Image (tube, grey):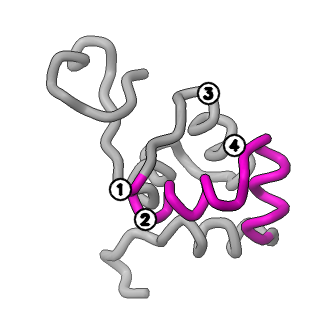
Amino acid sequence: MYVNESPTLLELIKLAGTNQQEFAKRLGVTPDAIRRWGKGERKPTLDKALMAATLLNCSIERFAMACKISISSDDDADTGTDITV
């Protein structure tokens, strides 16, 4: 991984000292959901995204980049972003 590259979701999970199955179990989702989030095929709900960032000990922004999604504040909610905080 280069310095300017964002880590993938699986890399964040590994850095947190866990694996995809255990991480999914702690979040209450399937390992397939984690795989799809990491590929950008599906988007986590805001509550799952916040919980995931906490479990991974990273910012919500870093988690969102790993899932190939964007976030915004309520002020920017009409910009077509994926998660609004």
Q: Amino acid at mark 1?
A: Lys
Amino acid type, label 2: Lys
C-alpha span from label 2 to label 3: 19 Å
Percent position (x, y) of residue 36? Answer: 51, 59
Label 3 vs label 4: CA separation? 11 Å
Precedes in sequence: disc 2 or disc 3: 2
The image quadrant where one finds the N terminus is: bottom left
What residue is pinned by disc 4? 54
Find the magenta span and give its range. Answer: 19-41
| Labelled pair 3, 4 in contact (Cβ < 8 Å) | no
Q: Main secondary structure of the magenta part?
A: helix
Q: Which mark is residue 39?
A: 2
- Which element type, helix, strand or loop, lies under badge 1? loop
- Alpha carbon separation for disc pair 3 and 1: 17 Å
User: Which one is in front in this view, the residue at disc 2 or the one at disc 3?
Assistant: 2
Q: Nearer the viewer, mark 3 or mark 4?
A: 3
Q: Residue at x 53, y 28 (%)?
A: 46
Calculate the distance from the C-alpha at mark 2 to the C-alpha at mark 1. 7 Å
Quick check: is 42 in the magenta stretch? no
Residue 31's x, y, as percent? 70, 60
Q: Say which residue label 1 marks.
A: 68
Structural crowding at the residue carrying mark 2, measured as other residues with C-alpha within 10 Å and reported as few (<14), some (14–19) or many (≥20) = some
| Residue 33 pos. (x, y %) | 61, 53
Dot 4 or dot 1: first in sequence order is 4
For the residues labelled 4 and 2, the Cα–Cα distance comes to: 20 Å
Image quadrant in which you'd find residue 18: bottom right
Disc 4 versus disc 1: nearer the observer: 1
The disc label shown at residue 47, or none: 3
Res 83 quadrant in image: top left
